[in-house]
Image (spheres, helix red, strand yellow):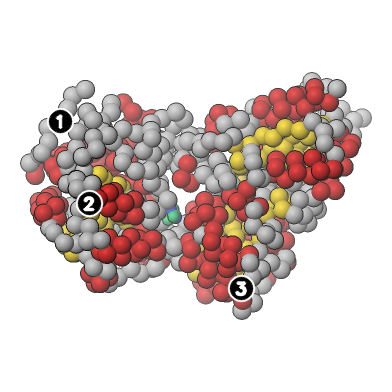
Amino acid sequence: MEMVQAPMSIEELEKMAAVIRCDIIEMICTAAAGHPGGSLSSADIVTALYFRIMRIDPEDPGWPDRDRFILSKGHACPVWYAALAERGYFDKAHLATLRRLDSILQGHPTMNKTPGIDMTVGSLGHGLSAGLGMALSGKLRKKDYHVWVIIGDGESQEGSIWEAAMAASKWKLDNLTAILDYNHLQNDDSVDKVMPIDPLIDKWKAFGWHVIEIDGHNMKDIVDALEATRSFKGMPTMIVANTVKGKGVSFMENVCEWHGKAPCQEEADKALTELRR
Amino acid sequence: MSKNTISPYRYVRPDILSILTSDDLFTKAERQPTRYSYAEAILELGAKNPDIVVLDADVSKSIKTNLFAERFPERSFNFGIAEQNMMAAAAGMATTGLIPYASTYAVFASMRALDMVRNSIHYPRLNVKIAASHGGITPGPDGVTHQGQEDLSIMRAIAGSTIIAPADPTTTKLAVWAAAEYDGPVYLSFTRDPVPVLFDMDYPFEIGKAVTVRDGKDATIIANRDLVVQSLVAAELLAGQGLDVRVIDCHTLKPLDIEVVLQAAHETGAIVTAENNMYYGGLGSAVAEVLVENHPIPMKRIGVRDTFAESGPYLELLKKYGLSAEHIVKAVEEVIERKS
Ligand SMILES: Cc1ncc(C[n+]2csc(CCOP(=O)(O)OP(=O)(O)O)c2C)c(N)n1
Ligand SMILES: [Mg+2]
């Protein structure tokens, strides 16, 4: 299998993010089901993590000292699968089998089936706690791996998110970074209408976290924030990434309906043309 | 069917035979996911009874309870992705005389919020209706995290629980309405995927009363929710082999209709249970408990074995995980064989 080189430059990362966005559209169109909106909004962050930031070895997915990544908003797994495939964890041909019987790519991420998936998720509000456990273990065993967890803004309505928030600050887990994909939409409607979560930055600060706010689609911002957080000591970091749900596909951007709807072939073609420009 | 034979079916739509024997049962027949039937029923109920309130946890668009929210905005409460809060709040509303229908997916209703469902709803016996979509492995492509394959078993373990798993769009509406008349917690289970309309509105729906929807004397299939249609298809396949098989729509899992189960045991001498749920703790277990204590006869359980399923199209999953009409046919042949 052809292996891509990492770490990538900002420009290379931007190109890779576009490739990953195309993979997402193709995958969900072929499966005729899945969640494009939240996959596209996380695409730049996931790309930065896999192609620049994380200490990982695609040849050895179980390497005990690797950085860990959890996409706690597991429904957006097409972005995770695309990144893993592009990084060389498995053959890209698998992407076309998403959600099919006997596929290694389940509708929600499953650690026992997919190489590179560090934690099974899909029921919202679990991933940050799982990441907390990995971070606690890292401290106990004096490992210097870092744990990265992406959570959704709708997902932040789960009480368990805040239970994890309290615990991470209690144990001063500076080896844990949460990244909020702040796209302002969830399944039913806008987060503001369904159940407001603001003032978010104040909340995370009040829970004892170091908070950074970035543009979640500006690759340099993303990389700078992720790099800074690895060396930040004494408390866990929350990166609030301002994002656009459906980012990169004009007709999906900020449209709630694209949360869990697959594009038909014609729509996919239109999306791919835009993304390849 | 020739003119002289009396139809073995009851309460079914007139064209049932052509539906059950068609190759494209799930693409041609009039059909609907029963979560939508719930949404329609609750809309009608809301218009009649001002005490009805609907609680959601950010899947109202999926269940279509957003229609209720549009029509009765002041009686609709979206809690966001916070199922535990929703369930305990439903309990609080019920203490004041409201009748909350708390709607989410089965995995979250029966597991994420189980402590609230047990301690805040069932222990004080509050009048909360739990409307759980995505029952069994009906949410195929989403995969295991969204497949409520054990909710019926879990709910059956709670003292004083009432559990209803209707088979089709018609009986789903009847179940939702019956639940409103009943004073106490009711767990209602719906499908994510469409199931064919099987029954007419003259179906005598009563909580706790199983309904024999196909007569037969050689064996009995007792089924619930989406495996009722598979059982009826199985019965027709068996009829082709000259076997005359009874089918009971056991929509109420708890309290179980012991009388109808024992009558079937006495009259047909062999029983197969069929459920899209773990094969322990649910319908199969409930029927087995009654038979073992009262009238042991050959019996076999169709259900999800001790495994998680996977992503895949609903009907393909039924085949792979042993829940299809063909599996039911084999089980019936086996129990009939054991009778002799
Ligand atoms: C506990 C739980 N409740 C409900 C769901 C169904 N669900 C899947 S995605 C989603 C909305 C998620 O919104 P958000 O976290 O904002 O994700 P994004 O906008 O990034 O897609 C819901 C309600 C779930 N997966 N888990
Ligand atoms: Mg969101």
Secondary structure state at the residue bearing disc 2 = helix
Q: Which residue lies under the disc numbered 3?
A: B94
The residues bearing labels 1 and 3 have C-alpha atoms spaced at a distance of 59 Å
Secondary structure state at the residue bearing disc 3 = helix
Tell whether B165 sits left or right of A183. right
Q: Is residue A270 above or below residue B77?
A: above
> Badge 2 local density, few (<14 within 10 Å), some, or many (20+)?
some
Chain assignment, label 2: A
> Badge 3 local density, few (<14 within 10 Å), some, or many (20+)?
many
> Residue drawn at (69%, 67%), measured in percent from left and top?
B184
Tell whether B50 sits left or right of A166. right
> Badge 1 local density, few (<14 within 10 Å), some, or many (20+)?
few
Task: Give how far across and how far down residue A76 sits, in percent.
Answer: 34, 46
The dot on residue B195 is: none
> Residue drawn at (51%, 37%), measured in percent from left and top?
B308
Task: Give how far across and how far down residue A210 sits, in percent.
Answer: 18, 64
- Residue type pointed to by label 1: Val
